[in-house]
Amino acid sequence: MDRNSPPPPAAKKPLKAVDYFLYALVAGFIFYAIYRVNDVLVYHWNWSRVFGFVIRFDEETQSWVSNLLLQGLATTIRLAVWSTIFATLVGVVMGYWRTCENLTLRIISRCYVELIRNIPPVVFIFIFYFFVASQIFPAMCIDNISSKDPLVNNPVFTFMFGDPKLLSNFLAGMICLSLFEGAYITEIVRAGIQSTPKGQWEAARAIGLSHLNVLRDVILPQAIRKILPPLAGQFITLIKDSAIISLISIQELTFVATEVAATTTRVFETWILVGAIYFVLCYSFAVLFAHLEKLARRSHR
Amino acid sequence: MNFVKTLKPFLLAVLLVVVGSSTAWAGVLEDIQKRGSLRVGMSTFVPWAMRDKKGELIGFEIAVATKVAADIGVEVEFVPTAWSGIIPALIAKKFDVIIGGMSITPQRNLTVNFTTPYAHSGQQMAASTKLAGNFKTREDFNSSKVTIACRRGATPCKAAQNMFPKATVRRFDDDAQAFQEVVNGNAHAMISSAPKPRFWSDAYPDKVFLPFGEENLTRGDEAFALRKGDADALNFFSNWIIVNTSNGWLKETHDFWFQDQSAWKDMVAPK
């Protein structure tokens, strides 16, 4: 057995009586809580209206079509995917700058990271939305893009960015999330680069590779393998954080849920359902990433 | 959120300066016509604006805004916005006008312009049969033992504090949560804009009643809100309201949505 192979898995221990007792205790507690909720909470549970906002049967076309909550979920997923892409770009550049020898680049990236990590997300989002976005977007003429322009009003664009009418709304949310999560990814990337031993740099430089080549061919491949697990965790955090931007009226799952709750007055049903949707979404990504990690580890060996 | 709240006037002041100084002035009406659409800021609030079965917006406000846009000759575009941030969003030019059942208050008027009122709502109270079933007068609710629920940052909370200074006021993010507290017996009463308390007491007749019947606690003046500094747009919208008050259209539409739910109940809920 060579020293690089993982240690053998620990032998599985059978469950003991005390374990079953604990299970019973937890189950008993849950049943008691449900019983108390039904007893204390005078509430006519009615899920049909809330489910109707997930998917509904259209009488005119005789088919099932998605309704508000499903559309909100689609926006959340779009937001998460695009924000991850941009946050990774920002994070890689800034993370590299954090480790640069150039003082100016180090100051810029350090300021960015510290500024965002030391402001509460909600406050950052308000400042960004009301000051920055409302100045940048008119300057870039994004607000003036007509929603009927064939450039934006086609199926491909709608699939990638959602309803063209909500484009500036979507972009504001996406940039906001990207900048916010980018700061955390910056730190992950920095840690990845710095965890590569200094000897690697020196050796690669010594055989005559340029600075860019060292980074691209030697450092980043090693760094990326190390940072993939925390990056996956950050992606799931990003999905959950996307709920905060409902405060600036980005039409994602949480925001449409507030509208559905206000319309139907079915507060509990709406939020329980939305919580379940978020759980399924995040947990499936967690399982997927764990699987990918396992594959990556195997292929590496 | 209190932190945000105390910062709000400051943020608004800076925003006014930044927006005011950096953009060349153009009339809102010209912008609307050039763009071909009227952007309306609103917040979901039964029966002012809500979602029907298909997820489309319907309601009194939606009808009003649609007619305003049709009279200008442009399309209408609704921008659903969280209520607590709706005034900053107007100032940040996320939309042209708030048609959102916003009551005129002097404080709000310092930051935005209001048209003449297009509706007069009032605050109505729904009370818990269990906790407040024997309460008769307003004085009964003005006691330190009484808890009154209301929606945060809205007129009802102020009304609750003014009329029932001794009572504990509990704030919630939306009316439905506030109302749920009454149904659950955690609050004696909740205050909200008419006719929501009535609709709710219809839905839970054995748990909730209206202690003062159809009589409203207060009378509000709801108006369109616009950014400051555009007298032309203000004049247009105000006169639109005057014309449509005189010809009876506003009252007719208001009655359709407010008198009872029978006219539109089928649109929002499956039979």
Image (tube, coloured by chain):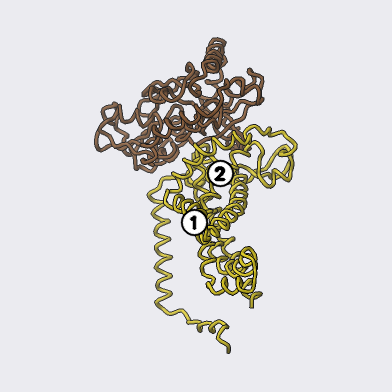
Chain colours: A yellow, B brown
Q: Is residue A78 visible?
A: yes
The residue positioned 43% from the left and 28% from the top of the image is B193
The residue positioned 52% from the left and 35% from the top of the image is B81
Question: Which corner quadrant of the image does residue A91 belong to?
Answer: bottom right
Q: Give percent across and percent down for residue A141.
A: 63, 34
Q: Is residue A275 visible?
A: no
The residue positioned 65% from the left and 32% from the top of the image is A144
Measured in 3D between alpha carbons, the distance from the residue under mark 2 to the one under mark 1, in whole angstroms, is 32 Å
Asked if residue A270 is positioned above or below residue A15 in the image, the reply reads above
* Amino acid at circle 1: Leu
Asked if residue B72 is positioned above or below residue B3 in the image, the reply reads above
Q: Is residue A219 left or right of residue A191?
A: right
Q: Do the residues indicated by labels 2 and 1 lie within the same chain of the protein?
A: yes
Q: Is residue A32 left or right of residue A3?
A: left
Residue to which mark 2 is pinned: A173
* Amino acid at circle 2: Gly
Residue to which mark 1 is pinned: A103
| Secondary structure found at label 1 | helix
